[in-house]
Amino acid sequence: MKNAAHFINRYNPYRNKFTKIIENNLFGQTDWITQNSYLKKQYIESSIKDLVTLGFFITNTTRFIGLDIDDHHNIGEAFLLNVYHQVTQLLSRASILFKSPRGLHLHYYLDQNIPTSIITEILKKKLQKFTNVEIKPTQNSSLRIPVESKALDPTTLQFLNLPFHEIISRCRLYHPAEIIGDEFLPENVRLSLTEKKQSIKKLKAIPVIEAIEKKLLPLENGNTNEAFLKLCQTYRCSGLDQDDAFYRFKLCLINSPNYTGDLINEKRLVQRIKSEYKNNEYVPKNFSRTPNLFANMIAENVIAEIQARQLLIYVPPTLKLSKQQKAGITYKCKTIKKVVVNITNWGDFQDEIFANKSELAIWDYMYPFYRNNRKQGLYPLPALMMQRWNKRYYEILNILIDIDFLRPSGYKYNPKMNICKYYWIDPDNKYSC
């Protein structure tokens, strides 16, 4: 089982399912079927020796990249070699090649683990012009377990005729940046996700923007200030940056043929947009999800504890509260209740991520120590997010810590590494319903 052990160590396959090839007697063809059973070492060994034909899947994180170049239309060997050379020029020379019945399988071995979904997404963009190249294996599509006798030298393209474990031990390990550049780095992944969200938001906002423009156009001389402010607010709150807003205003001016005011001056228009954006910076909304049905009840229990301990204002038994003091306490209670509800919903959202292996792998990659902290029952509470809930969140946080609704961990935060503070939420279930 030496070959199987080397395969498992290098490829880290998902062991709870695999694919196998069967003969279709009706049409005289072969088909791949999925077997939802354990991929045993003896199966792997037999497949490497070409006694059976099996395919494997990979897990949520991987140190292996596989590419399948297929000659679907039987164009010929020259076509395969041309595609192979183009792919290796774009990425890097493969660690090892294996000949398949209709093409070539490129195997790249990495020196560190990367979330499968991230590396697949990056490769899809890089290889989108190659219609004959597939990224395999993934969590949903399998790649044939390499056959020892089909191994090719990635430079000479000659058969190696060596034992599988020797082939594996001689292959080059790549740093991910050598193949896919720096797009795999956590900070770039976070940036890419942010840009994608912003693009989606802009696309969704276009019908709303156009409807508002239709109501306010055409612009008229001497009566444009109110329309300008409304349009600027629409663009800003829809996620458009200043350049996008400038473009939309230029379209508005085209649709206002009788307008001759100062907005026609591009320099003046840019200045006004810049000023409006600066003075009315848009704060994005909180994460959206279905709220916890018990979040309000938990918040009520928290408020009751705060009031019982007179943490908002101390009132001696001999004195009565004035109307102004009562109004102030009511306002503070509403503010704290809103933050508690948001924290409770955020905790549920984090539990959903932790339960999803694929999502968990991505979060752990982008935010160091995330998986380890969540295993301990800790929840991340980023300062930027809490600032959106309340600008004086730190005062509320201290109150919630005093009543043990939140219990801070001893781990330090590091904004440069994207590590925020972690807390236990209601650790003793004192406030849960």
Image (cartoon, helix red, strand yellow):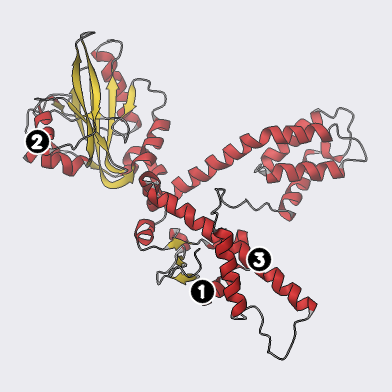
Secondary structure under tag 1 reads: helix
Which quadrant of the structure image shows residue 51?
Answer: top left
Q: Position of residue 69 (x, y in %)?
A: 28, 22
Cα gap from disc 2 to disc 3, whole angstroms: 63 Å
Cα gap from disc 3 to disc 1, whole angstroms: 16 Å
- At label 2, which amino acid type do we have? Gln
Which residue does the image show at 52% across and 75% down from the upper left?
403
Measured along the vertical axis of the image, is residue 376 above or below residue 208?
below
Which residue does the image show at 75% across and 82% down from the upper left?
321
Mark 3 residue crowding within 10 angstroms, few (<14) / some (14–19) / many (20+): some
N-term mark: 2 or 3: 2
Q: Can you see residue 155?
A: no
Secondary structure under tag 3 reads: helix
Query: Which residue was labeled with disc 2?
Result: 42
Q: Which mark is residue 335?
A: 3
Q: Which mark is residue 255?
A: none
Secondary structure under tag 2 reads: helix
N-term mark: 3 or 1: 3
Cα gap from disc 1 to disc 2, whole angstroms: 56 Å
Which residue does the image show at 60% across and 71% down from the upper left?
303
Residue farthest toward the top in the current orientation of the protein: 27
- At label 3, which amino acid type do we have? Thr
